């Protein structure tokens, strides 16, 4: 009887592992679909993902201060173009949307650095 209990537990563990793997696969599939959807929406306006981060984020504010001037200017132009298109209820032409890079990150490293510095400062207080 004791062997039957162990065998049942092993089968249950395998079923749980299989279910967990299936769930992770489903989550990955949904995440990929969502990412494609977000990127398509951003490309319609010529934006990158980091262009739409809220500016009330203290790490973003610091990163923007240290962003190279040309990258900052490009960011502002993308945002202004998106605002203009939105007011006109228009999108970029399909051929221009196709060359947009909404998933290209330009602030992530700077933001991570300033987040680390901010957290260290808070720990020292």
Image (cartoon, rainbow, N blue to C red):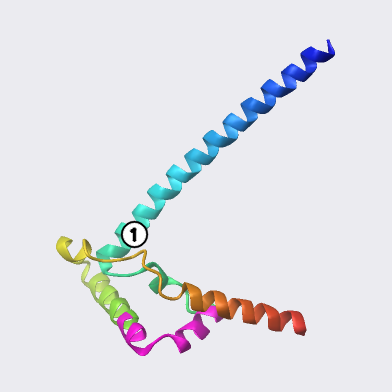
Circle 1 sits in a helix, a strand or a loop, which is it? helix
Is 64 a magenta residue? yes
Residue 83 appears in the figure: yes
Q: Quadrant of the N terminus?
A: top right
Residue 56 appears in the figure: no
Q: Quadrant of the C terminus?
A: bottom right
Q: Is residue 61 left or right of residue 118?
A: left
On screen, residue 122 above or below 24 = below
Badge 1 density bin: few <14, some 14–19, many ≥20, Cα 10 Å: some
Q: Residue furthest top?
A: 1
Q: Position of residue 55 (x, y in %)?
A: 48, 79
Tell me which secondary structure the magenta stretch mostly adopts.
helix
Q: Position of residue 111 (x, y in %)?
A: 52, 76
Q: Is residue 87 left or right of residue 10?
A: left
Task: Determine which residue is flagged by label 1.
Answer: 39
- The magenta-colored residue range is 58-74
On screen, residue 39 above or below 50 = above
Is 59 a magenta residue? yes
Question: Residue at point 47% right, 89% down?
Answer: 65
Question: Residue at point 40% right, 51% down?
Answer: 34
Q: Residue furthest right?
A: 2
Q: Residue furthest front?
A: 3
In the depicted view, which residue is nearer to us: 87 or 12?
12
In the depicted view, which residue is nearer to us: 54 or 2?
2
Question: Residue at point 84% right, 14% down?
Answer: 2
Question: Residue at point 29% right, 77% down?
Answer: 78
On screen, residue 1 above or below 102 = above
In the depicted view, which residue is nearer to us: 42 or 1?
1
Give the quarter of the image for residue 116: bottom right
Give the quarter of the image for residue 87: bottom left
């Amino acid at each position: 009887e004791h062997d039957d209990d162990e065998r049942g537990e092993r089968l249950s563990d395998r079923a749980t592992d299989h279910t967990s793997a299936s769930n992770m696969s489903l989550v990955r599939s949904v995440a990929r679909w969502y990412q494609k959807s977000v990127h398509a929406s951003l490309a319609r306006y010529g934006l990158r993902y980091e262009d739409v981060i809220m500016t009330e984020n203290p790490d973003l504010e610091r990163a923007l201060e240290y962003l190279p001037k040309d990258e900052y200017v490009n960011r502002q132009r993308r945002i202004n173009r998106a605002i203009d298109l939105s007011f006109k209820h228009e999108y970029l032409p399909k051929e221009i949307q196709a060359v947009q890079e909404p998933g290209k990150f330009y602030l992530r490293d700077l933001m991570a650095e300033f987040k680390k510095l901010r957290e260290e400062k808070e720990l020292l207080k």
